[in-house]
Amino acid sequence: MSDEQLVIVPIPSLVSVLLHHEQQKGAPLTEKDVLDITEQAACVAMPRDVAAQVAEGRGYDDIRPEHAWEDWKAIRPTLPAQP
């Protein structure tokens, strides 16, 4: 067994999940919304190098679950407007 450290990775990305919820809501997500959605997100454990490959393939770093609200506020203005 490898002693490589595993990291927890939301699948699908929290960015995509939160954006989808915001589009469904038709209004900006509140802090409570973001925290509730993040707590319910499906996650998998994977080696750190595999997680880095996932992020590279996606083309962006995901929101850190432990800093979901702060990260969401920072990344939200860079995302496409609601269709």
Image: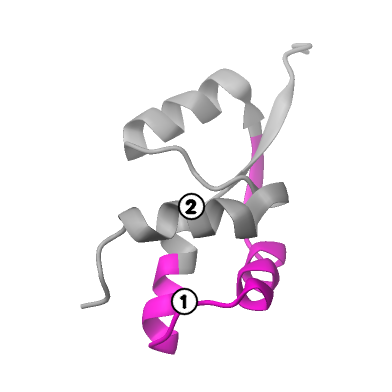
Task: Using the image, determine if residue 22 lies above or below residue 72.
Answer: below
Q: Mark 1 highlights which residue?
A: 21
Q: Residue at x 44, y 87 (%)?
A: 25
Q: CA distance from mark 1 to mark 2?
A: 17 Å
- Quadrant where the C terminus sits is bottom left
- Quadrant where the N terminus sits is top right
**Residue numbers of the magenta segment:** 19-45
Secondary-structure class at tag 2: helix
Q: Mark 2 highlights which residue?
A: 74
Secondary-structure class at tag 1: helix
The reply to whether residue 10 is in sight is yes
The spot of residue 80 in percent (x, y) is 25, 63
The spot of residue 5 in percent (x, y) is 74, 20
Q: Residue at x 72, y 64 (%)?
A: 39
Magenta stretch contains residue 3: no
The spot of residue 68 in percent (x, y) is 63, 55
Depth order, front residue of 28/13: 28
Q: In the displayed structure, does residue 83 sit left or right of residue 23?
A: left
The picture quadrant where one finds residue 49 is: top right
Q: Residue at x 67, y 50 (%)?
A: 67
Tell which circle, 1 or 2, labels the residue nearer the N-terminal end.
1
Disc 2 crowd rating (10 Å Cα; few below 14, some 14-19, many 20+) is few
For the residues bearing labels 1 and 2, Cβ distance under 8 angstroms: no
The spot of residue 58 in percent (x, y) is 35, 39
The amino acid type found where label 1 is placed reads His
